[in-house]
Image: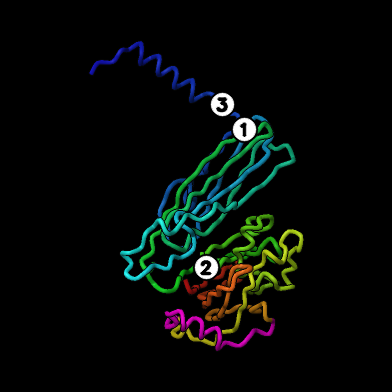
């Protein structure tokens, strides 16, 4: 095939012109070791980190991060036989607004880094980062995370996650949605009612101790204006005096329910108190306004307090 040299030169000039034309708003992922900046496969509930840089000719007005789950982030209770399952019976979950930050300082540049947990169920999640300036012009970037689990047909949902309560006080809390296995930072729930309704337990740190507390625990002092009682899940927790082997053997819906029913309440009904390795708690949770209760267990695999607080735990919950 023969090409016309003048035409090629004209096209090259056009491409060069497009490449050098500055966009009014720019947003780019920062690529580096340990950072997620493109499509990838991850393990269930893996901890991932991303960093994004946005700049604009005019002051920036908003930085927003959204995530959508395909299919739903909740575990699927497959029929028997599994071959009769029709994916059309499971609609995709709603889009979760992970961050919605409004700027009023007139800044034209922003660098944002976040650490998040991948979905704990098989499927994909699409993260969309958008920056908008005061003229309403927007730049967006996205990546997709794919998770494949080998135990998706089990009658219970199980996953292991790592929580990092960063500091004493509200800013360091981490918010856990038990059924989908999502771990959220404060800014993802502070002003997002739909996200608040997902939260079952809160990792809180006081002095050098880490505890798990239900959203209605008075010590959390959650704002009744920002987080009204109607948005707080009625989670109940109990002290399960189970060994690690007994935890592993709780592999049916009945065993998970019985473990909860046979466990005594904590001294403070809405808090575990200071956590320690091999602690097991039993829980019962349901959606606000629903009578469909799900039971489960959570075991502390490891807990580190210094230099960086960290809790590793495994959850088993009825589908």
Q: Is residue 14 above or below residue 286?
A: above
Q: Quadrant of the N terminus?
A: top left
Q: Earlier in the sequence, mark 3 or mark 2?
A: 3
> Is 3 on the left or on the right of 142, as rendered?
left
User: Which circle marks residue 278 in the picture?
Assistant: none
User: Which circle marks residue 22 in the picture?
Assistant: 3
CA separation, marks 1 and 3?
13 Å
Is residue 202 visible in the rendered image? The answer is no
- On the image, the x and y values in percent for residue 13 come to 44, 17
* Tag 2 residue: 179
Magenta stretch: includes residue 266 = yes
User: Which circle marks residue 137 in the picture?
Assistant: 1
Q: Is residue 289 above or below residue 71?
A: below
Q: Secondary structure at mark 3?
A: loop
The residue positioned 52% from the left and 68% from the top of the image is 179
Q: Secondary structure at mark 1?
A: loop
Pointer 2 with pointer 1, Cβ within 8 A: no
Quadrant of the rendered structure where residue 241 is? bottom right
The residue positioned 55% from the left and 51% from the top of the image is 95
- On the image, the x and y values in percent for residue 136 come to 65, 33
From the viewer's side, name the closer residue of 113 and 214: 214
Q: Nearer the viewer, mark 3 or mark 2?
A: 2
Q: Is residue 45 above or below residue 104?
A: below
From the viewer's side, name the closer residue of 34 and 165: 165
């Amino acid at each position: 095939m023969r090409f016309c040299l003048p035409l090629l030169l004209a096209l090259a000039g056009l491409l060069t012109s497009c490449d050098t034309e500055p966009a009014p708003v720019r947003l780019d992922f920062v690529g580096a070791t340990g950072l997620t900046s493109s499509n990838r496969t991850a393990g269930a509930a893996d901890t991932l980190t991303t960093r994004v840089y946005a700049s604009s000719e005019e002051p920036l007005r908003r930085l927003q991060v959204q995530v959508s789950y395909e299919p739903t982030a909740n575990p699927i209770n497959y029929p028997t036989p599994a071959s009769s399952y029709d994916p059309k019976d499971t609609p995709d979950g709603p889009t979760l607004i992970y961050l919605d930050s409004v700027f009023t300082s007139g800044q034209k540049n922003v660098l944002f880094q976040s650490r998040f947990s991948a979905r704990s169920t098989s499927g994909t999640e699409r993260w969309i980062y958008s920056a908008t300036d005061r003229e309403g012009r927007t730049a967006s970037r996205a990546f997709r995370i794919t998770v494949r689990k080998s135990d998706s047909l089990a009658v219970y949902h199980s996953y292991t996650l790592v929580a990092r309560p960063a500091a004493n006080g509200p800013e360091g809390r981490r918010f856990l949605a038990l059924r989908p296995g999502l771990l959220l930072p404060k800014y993802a729930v502070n002003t997002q009612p739909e996200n608040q309704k997902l939260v079952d337990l809160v990792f809180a740190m006081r002095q050098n101790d880490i505890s798990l507390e239900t959203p209605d625990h008075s010590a959390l002092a959650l704002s009744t204006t920002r987080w009204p009682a109607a948005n707080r899940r009625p989670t109940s927790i109990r002290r399960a005096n189970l060994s690690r082997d007994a935890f592993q053997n709780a592999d049916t819906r009945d065993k998970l329910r019985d473990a909860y029913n046979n466990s005594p309440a904590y001294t403070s009904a809405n808090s575990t108190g200071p956590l320690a390795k091999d602690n097991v708690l039993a829980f019962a949770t349901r959606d606000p306004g629903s009578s469909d209760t799900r039971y489960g267990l959570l075991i502390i695999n490891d807990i580190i307090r210094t230099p960086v607080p960290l809790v590793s735990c495994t959850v088993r919950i009825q589908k």
